[in-house]
Image (tube, helix red, strand yellow):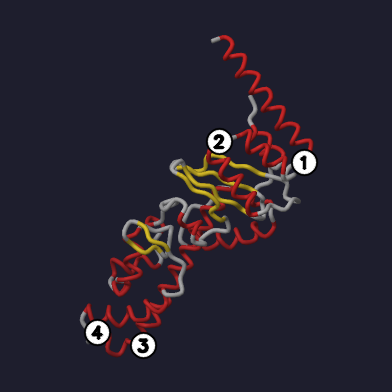
Amino acid sequence: MKTVYDILNKAYDKTLLDLKEVRQHHRKVCELLEEYQVPHDGKRDDDVIQCEILYESLMVKRQFEDVFFDTYVKMYDYWYDLNYLERKAQMNVDIDRFVSELRHFEAEGETIYMPAFAPGFNHLYHTEIVLLDLKQYHRFIRECADQMQRSRYGALPFQHGFSSCELVAEAEVGYVVYHAAMHRWYLYDESGLKNTVSVDQKQEVQEDCKKEIALHLLSGEDEALTACLLEHALVKKRVGRKLEKVLRKRKKKQEKNANKE
């Protein structure tokens, strides 16, 4: 039996890459990921969203490295006269000044500036970046694909601006993010993308309605979700009738099964 989500996603079936501005930015994303040999072949919305977070992380990583090299050049004349702790102390003056302006969040006891990397890697760049002078760490400048992870921190990258999707609602069962240009809600749980809800892109979605739809999606309240969409005229009338038909059929089937029992 068709679901409310089947109807909505068939009626509004454009992907993120169908949007010109997203497609153009995604090309830039893929170019950077290719430089680091990071896989990026997927074309689904979730692939595009996750690649964007990888891209944002790599851009911040490069900025860290720029600070490292600039400071190294300034200190070059006396770099090798200093011990490790002295180099670190001077290097971290510039690093601390740099990170004060960065987006970040706390996770697993560490400040995360690059959500595609584990806490230990973030710690290396934030606190011990002076180690990039050593061969075993210097390789991370160009070879870091094996250090990158998708969806490591759940909702946090969306909450703190590392994606064009914004976090709208969160609960124990998962979280919902919203892409404004697509008029689409994405429900994630611990296993990844679980469901989506899309509405007419020509309609304006108010903030309270955006949150309400996210909460219905989180709770799986199909009837309440449909009522909200119809009340705020977020779907075409033809689509609305199909949604109501699906709910009537499901209710009729439930009543039939209840009578059998």
Give SS at disc 4.
Answer: loop
Q: Quadrant of the C terminus?
A: top right
Pointer 2 local density, CA inside 10 Å: few below 14, some 14–19, many at least 20: few
Q: Nearer the viewer, mark 2 or mark 3?
A: 2
Q: Quadrant of residue 63 in the image?
A: bottom left
- Pointer 3: what residue? 74
Residue at x 49%, y 52% (from the top left corner): 39
Q: Earlier in the sequence, mark 2 or mark 3?
A: 3
Q: Position of residue 201 (x, y in %)?
A: 72, 50
Q: Earlier in the sequence, mark 4 or mark 3?
A: 3
Q: Quadrant of the N terminus?
A: top right
Name the mark on residue 80.
4
Type of residue at label 2?
Answer: Gly
Number of marks in the image?
4
Type of residue at label 1?
Answer: Lys
Name the mark on residue 93.
none
Pointer 3 local density, CA inside 10 Å: few below 14, some 14–19, many at least 20: few
Q: Position of residue 258 (x, y in %)?
A: 57, 14
Note whether 40 is above or below 101 in the view shown: above
- Alpha-carbon span between mark 2 and mark 4: 62 Å
Q: Earlier in the sequence, mark 2 or mark 4?
A: 4
Q: Earlier in the sequence, mark 1 or mark 2?
A: 2
Q: Position of residue 123 (x, y in %)?
A: 32, 65
Furthest toward the top, the residue is 260
Residue at x 69%, y 24% (from the top left corner): 248
Nearest the viewer among 248 and 202 is 248
Pointer 1 local density, CA inside 10 Å: few below 14, some 14–19, many at least 20: some
- Pointer 1: what residue? 236
- Pointer 2: what residue? 220
Q: Earlier in the sequence, mark 1 or mark 3?
A: 3
Nearest the viewer among 146 and 89 is 89
